Amino acid sequence: MRVRLLRAPNPGLFTREGTNTWLIESGGAAAVVDPGPVISSHMTAIRLALEGLEPAAVLVTHTHPDHAPAANPLAAGLGVPTYGCGPGPGFVPDVEVGDGQPVPVGDAEVIAVHTPGHTADHVCYLSGSALFSGDHVIGGSTVMVEHMAEYMDSLRRLSKLDIEVIYPGHGPVISNPGEVLEHYLEHRLSREQQILDAVRGGADTLGAVVAAVYSEVDRSLHFAAAQSVGAHLRKLGEEGLVEIPMGADDWGAPVYAGGSS
């Protein structure tokens, strides 16, 4: 199997250098992973990279706008199906993949691995010992999370697989996946304890918790941190460690320490 990177020209705060589009080549065939937003120059680059190969599929890890919208028009032009966990803004899969479902690409099989957490519809793709991780794990940074309990369960699941390399949706290739997955889990557990300590110390709203936990981070970036803090608070609420009577997504909604210690 051969893997090639074609980075979309969409750099930004959340996309870093741009979305990583991956080509999986095997036996004269190729699949495209996460073609990104509809950018004509990028779609042309993908089609040129596929010259001499038999297109097999367009795989989507999740339906965020920096990963999925180009999938349907690209696949239609190539005459191949799209695969994804489900429909979302700008994307409707031809095949809704279930966990463990194989997608043939030449001599190889790419296996869907459902990894909810970053989004409910997130799926990674495993080919041999190579994982295409979308935004579940990215190179050189952590990620935003919608549902923290599911996200951490998905990290633990991946840590049990035989993975030797991760091709992420953003950032460089990850050649030490075991260490990175362990770091991701440790980081989340450490952040969770910081958040719990902040609530027990008197931080009584989402905004107050963000300000306490990210006191050394530029306040202009606090809005970005609020999503993950909210996800941690919801997880802690599910576990009875905090009380969130109005939900965890309102900057000024009350948050209280729970009865457990």
Image (cartoon, rainbow, N blue to C red):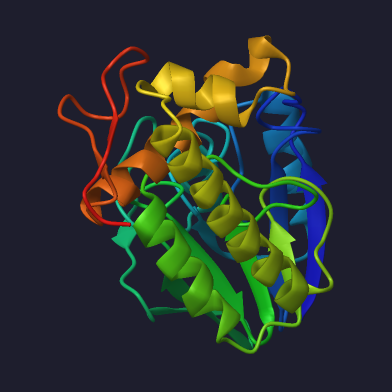
Give the residue drawn at x 54%, y 36%.
70
Q: Is residue 139 left or right of residue 160?
A: right
Where's residue 247, x and y in %? 22, 29
Location of the N terminus (image quadrant): bottom right
Q: Is residue 225 above or below residue 243?
A: above
Q: Is residue 197 left or right of residue 36?
A: left
Q: Is residue 198 above or below residue 117?
A: above
39 or 76: which is nearer to us?
39
Location of the C terminus (image quadrant): bottom left
Give the residue drawn at x 79%, y 68%.
3
Q: Does any portion of residue 56 appear in the rendered image?
A: yes
Give the residue drawn at x 37%, y 15%.
251
Give the residue drawn at x 72%, y 26%.
10
Q: Is residue 196 above or below residue 204?
A: below
Q: Does any portion of residue 145 appear in the rendered image?
A: no
Q: Is residue 115 above or below residue 217?
A: below
Where's residue 100, x and y in %? 39, 81
How many numbered discs? 0
Q: In the picture, residue 45 is in which quadrant?
A: top right
160 or 218: which is nearer to us?
218
Where's residue 110, x and y in %? 54, 78
